[in-house]
Image (cartoon, coloured by chain):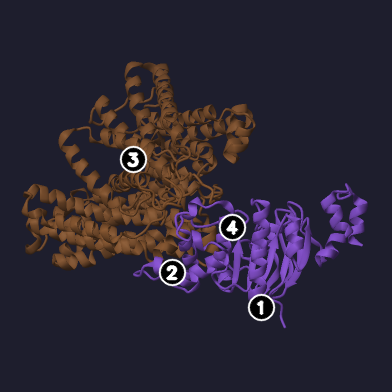
Amino acid sequence: MTALLDVRNLAKSYGGVHAVRGVSFSLEAGQILALIGPNGAGKSTCFNMLNGQIRPNAGSITLAGQDITGLAPRVVWRKGVGRTFQITATFASMTVRENVQVALLSHHGKLWAAFRYAGAAYLKEAEALLALVGMEAQAARPCGELAYGDLKRLELAIALANDPKLLLMDEPTAGMAPKERVDLMRLTAGIAREKGIGVLFTEHDMDVVFEHADSVMVLNRGELIATGSPEAVRRDPQVRAIYLGDGLLYDAKHREGDAA
Amino acid sequence: MEFILVQTLSGLASAASLFLVASGLSIIFGVTRIVNFAHGAFYMLGAYMAFTLTDRWTGAFGFWGAIIAASLVVAVLGALMEMVLLRRIYQAPELFQLLATFGVTLMVQDIVVLIWGPEDLMGPRAPGFTGAVTVFGRMVPSYDFLLIALGPVVLGLLWLLFHYTRWGVLVRAATQDRDMVAALGVNQKWLFTSVFALGVFLAALGGALQIPRTTVSHSMDLAIIVEVFVVVVIGGLGSVLGAFVAAIIVSELNAFGILIFPKISLILVFLVMAVVLVIRPWGLFGKPESAPRPAAGLSIRPWRPFTPAERIAVAVGVFGAAVLPFFLGNYALTVGAEILVFVLFAASLHFLMTVGGLASFGHAAYFGLGAYGAAFLVKFTGAPMEAALLVGPLMGLAGAVVFGWFCVRLSGVYFAMLTLAFAQIAWSIAFQWVDVTGGDNGMLGIWPSTWASSPRGFFWLALGIAVVGVGILRVLVFSPFGYGLRASRDSALRSEAIGIDRRSMQWVAFIVAGTFAGISGATFAFLKGSVFPDFLGIPTSVDGLVMVLLGGIETVSGAVVGAVVYKALAIWLMSQTDLSKLVLGAIIVLLVVAFPKGIVGFLEDLRYRLRPPRANGAGPKTAGYGIAKVEAAE
């Protein structure tokens, strides 16, 4: 059986700086995989390549056996990849419900319909999605006045609108209060396990990572340095060195140790 | 061969002034991110001021001193404008900045006529450069050689200024990252003002240097600004070198375009611009815009269709308009029909601008194309009015298909400048291709069919077209297509991530808007019984923008209200004062600075304040320029 997402030797450089090099991993349906690493490790670049915002220099991305390398984000989305952003991106001039309706209209290929009322389209589905993330009470509110935590939940509802096989979440809890973070990730994990959605997320909050991830990958300076269960990664000496900063990171001897 | 060389020299000489003005515009944009529409006005003021001063001061010192002094005086005026007007709108959407500086342009046009009179003025020759040099048996004015040398000299001086003075380094730093420069403790206000003054100085110098070559007239501002827009679109905004190279390209294309296509000389420039835009959308030396700024029209209050009560009110309003012919006289009905024509025009622009987030500065192109389309049908095929009204607007549609394809590749100011340039190209074709369009004399005798020939009949026809047109556009706003369009306006990132093909949607919106503008243009042709190049002119485009702005850019119904109020006001104003441009310009500036939400936006605010929508909902919103006051959910 092929993996849901299979990434091979992904690489991207910006004028001599190797932002990401030789990253390979795979993700099964229903699995929750965390991608962690210090600032500037290449997490966001990696993410943006997966959903097509950035074209990789080399490597391949395969979604359920289909090559999606270098496709535009909107094409990738049509193949069943939902995405949330580090800084929420929603439609500020619409109500909460309309935000989800637009995603549903797009999913059903109805965006070119010119002569029906969009506000009445896919009402039930929109309500169901909002209920799933606990936003049904706020459906009629203008999106522009929502609190940040609610915007994050709305983004999740939008990302789920196309019944995705894979959910990409770039720092899903960034900018949220501690309690909200835990709630949002529990919610996401619950939905993913129930629907068999594969989730890949980046995160700085280790509590969130270790509570929910089935597996953790650590990215440092563009390369994957550790992959495994949360427990194994937690004990990995290299990972400890990066996060605790033993001062040997830029030491030549240490780097030789890396290669060995 | 000799002829080609002489023509090349003439082109290079024209490039000098163009470069001066364009580099000033580019420097200002680099630091302040404002495209200064009034740059052409400062160019014109420089020429007029130099005319006055060279008239007083004679001799070589007097002449060159006057040129410099005139430029300095205008630079001070520019700095004043920056302090009084622009400082208030740096955070506003680009559309507002373009409109405000256009308002200043309008005011300057009338002020110039007030001070210097409406006649073209002839300046003195430059002392020491009065003769001509014989090149391969042809006479080339020696002043041209001075101008040819001046371009590279100014480019070199600017380079030295930006690389070897503290101020220049700050300007370059601010061009790259304004926030960082501010964080380093540099006084932004004075940096912006001084940069603006330098840019205006260059524009005024460009104008002042023109007086030995051409006559000084009060129409030189719009002529140069369009060419300058073409130059910066080709060269890349913010790049002085780009302005230099593109000014030479454009001037040479103009010099040779006249030889190859004497009737439509602008066509060569257009082709080159099109090629550059396809290969390098940010211009030859420009850099891609970073994050696009929020488009105008972003309202925090979600739109909704009319409630049943509002529907009844609209029906009553339409009925009221329909019975007007029983009460009003012929003149009032003709004015009414004109207002109705512009209601549809404004609504079509509103669809593109507010719903699509694409602020077009050349929407009159499609209005005019529709009018000419109808006129061609009547004149060349003898078609009746009904057929011409149906088929004529297809020319607006065709124009929108072609021009829109290029325009939607860009956004923000680039989009605005490109739409303006396309409209100006359409205008110049109508103006220059005399055999087909009649040129400045227009095409006459475009009369309606008998049943619509009375003012009353035509009023009903215009009303029917406006009601159906606005109705269709309104249905589109609330259709899935309208939502998708609005989604790509609100967040390019999110809409792409949910499978919306932004560019195709915007292109279709452009075509829809162009078609409806074409319909209103065709109607207008039959109302006037004639078509003129003015229909495609910049003033017509700006009229549309002001209508939408006056009505309320963030609202759905604003365009209709704005068109009625503005058109009625403008017609009344014309009958009351000779200084209509001065008043109109002042109104535009006032609108942008003090009243950016327009009439309908103001009324909606009022209604929210008096009656909040729900008990648990948030209270009244007082959003300024899209800066939402975000309230906690709990």
Q: Which mark is residue A152?
A: 4
Q: Nearer the viewer, mark 4 or mark 1?
A: 4
Q: Secondary structure at mark 1?
A: loop
Do badges 2 and 3 share one subunit?
Answer: no
Badge 2 vs badge 3, beta-carbon distance below 8 Å: no
The amino acid sitting under disc 3 is Leu
Q: Chain of mark 4?
A: A
Measure the C-alpha gap from mark 3 to mark 4: 48 Å
> Which residue corresponds to mark 2?
A111
| Vertical placement of residue B183 versus B2, above or below | above
First-in-chain label (2 vs 4): 2
First-in-chain label (4 vs 1): 1
> Which residue corresponds to mark 1?
A64
Can residue B434 be seen in this snapshot?
A: no
Q: Nearer the viewer, mark 3 or mark 4?
A: 4
| Vertical placement of residue B298 versus B522, above or below | above
Q: Position of residue B374 (x, y in %)?
A: 20, 62
The amino acid sitting under disc 4 is Lys
Badge 1 vs badge 3, beta-carbon distance below 8 Å: no
Q: Chain of mark 1?
A: A
Do badges 2 and 1 share one subunit?
Answer: yes
First-in-chain label (2 vs 1): 1
Measure the C-alpha gap from mark 2 to mark 3: 40 Å
> Which residue corresponds to mark 3?
B222
Image colour assigned to chain A: purple
